[in-house]
Amino acid sequence: MFGKRTVDNMVARSAESDADRRNFLRSAGLAGLGVVGASTLPALASADAAPAAAPSDAAVLNFALNLEYLEAEFYSYASFGHGLNPRITTGKGRRGGVIGGRKVKFKSRAIKNYAKEIAQDEIDHVRFLRKALGGAKVSRPAIDIKNSFTAAARAAKLIGPRQTFDPYANENNFLLAAFLFEDVGVTAYKGAAPLINNKTYLEAAAGILAVEAYHAGIIRTNLYARGLHFEARQISWARDSLDGRTNKDWGIGTPDFANLTPTGRDGVAFSRSAPQVLNVVYLTPKRRTKGGFFPFGVNGPIDTSGANG
């Protein structure tokens, strides 16, 4: 889709000023995206509700397992042309199917090899978390890796309102789709770390976070090398419009400067809470229990996105 399209004129406008970001967020029109593949739900609780008890370690790991199912399915189809082995998709909760997915016709040997390595890592993460959780593990929920990418691309203004986005059509689309996930994975594991009490589980989560950060660096570097600064910025700002009022997301920079390691002023990676992560994968800034990439929601007790106004 993006291929060799010249984006110099758009990149010239891609300096990530707060003013430009606010203008984008006001016009993004993301409020209704969470209905992709699911019906809109009423608000589940008031903003003044008493805070809930801290989730158990098993709940936190199962939340991570849902995200790993999503990433593993996306990369497995892209690299191998098929999804996860059904034997590693069982567990508690409703097991769902996968909508979309096919093998990418990679032209670059390097990108093909990167994709295969990342795919295997994500499959290994699924296996590892399932083993750690034992009988408490949740099954793979229904996953949509077709319609949701189109909704996300439209919201990011990468395509028009009647166009579709196929993440498997070419290498550039694949990298942009991967970019949508990878930064979220890093911020999700960092946000979950303070919630984990068992040191063995915490060490394991830290190890997975490190791998996800490597993946994010690979994707961001290759997007930068291909000059896809504008497209990455649009995706970044779309994510930021979903997860709250603060700026937790930044693109990869411009031709004049690189931003391959998105951090705050202290050089530390950002965190996202579980509700903020679900805002992104449900594709809604509202309080919901399903939508977007998970048309019937995730499995486990942590299943509700945040209310962001």
Image: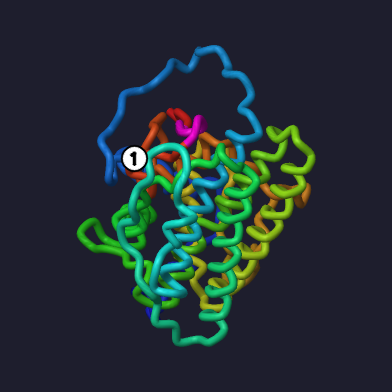
State which quadrant residue 190 falls in.
top right
Check the picture and name the quadrant holding the C terminus. top left
Element at badge 1? loop
Asked if residue 242 shows in the view, the reply is yes
Is residue 41 shown above or below 281?
above
Q: Look at 43% across and 40% down and name the residue there.
A: 298
Q: Is residue 55 left or right of residue 112?
A: right
Residue range corresponding to the magenta coloring: 300-305
Q: Is residue 8 visible?
A: no
Where's residue 78, x and y in %?
A: 43, 71
Which quadrant would residue 212 be assigned to in this image?
bottom right
Q: Which residue is mark 1?
A: 296
Identify the residue at horizontal 57%, vertical 76% (top origin).
Answer: 114
Give percent across and percent down for residue 237.
48, 51
Question: Residue 127 sits in which quadrant?
Answer: bottom right
Spot occupied by residue 220 in the image (x, y as percentages of width and height): 58, 67
Q: Position of residue 20 (x, y in %)?
A: 48, 50
Residue type marked 1: Phe
Majority secondary structure of the magenta segment?
A: loop
Q: Residue at coordinates 68% horizontally, 53% vertically from top-left? A: 209
Is 218 within the magenta? no
Residue at the location (20% across, 59% down)? 162
Residues 236 and 118: in front is 118
Residue density around tag 1, few if under 14, some if 14–19, many if 20 or more, within 10 Å: many
The answer to which of 304 and 65 lies nearer the viewer is 65
Position of 180 with respect to 160 (left or right) is right
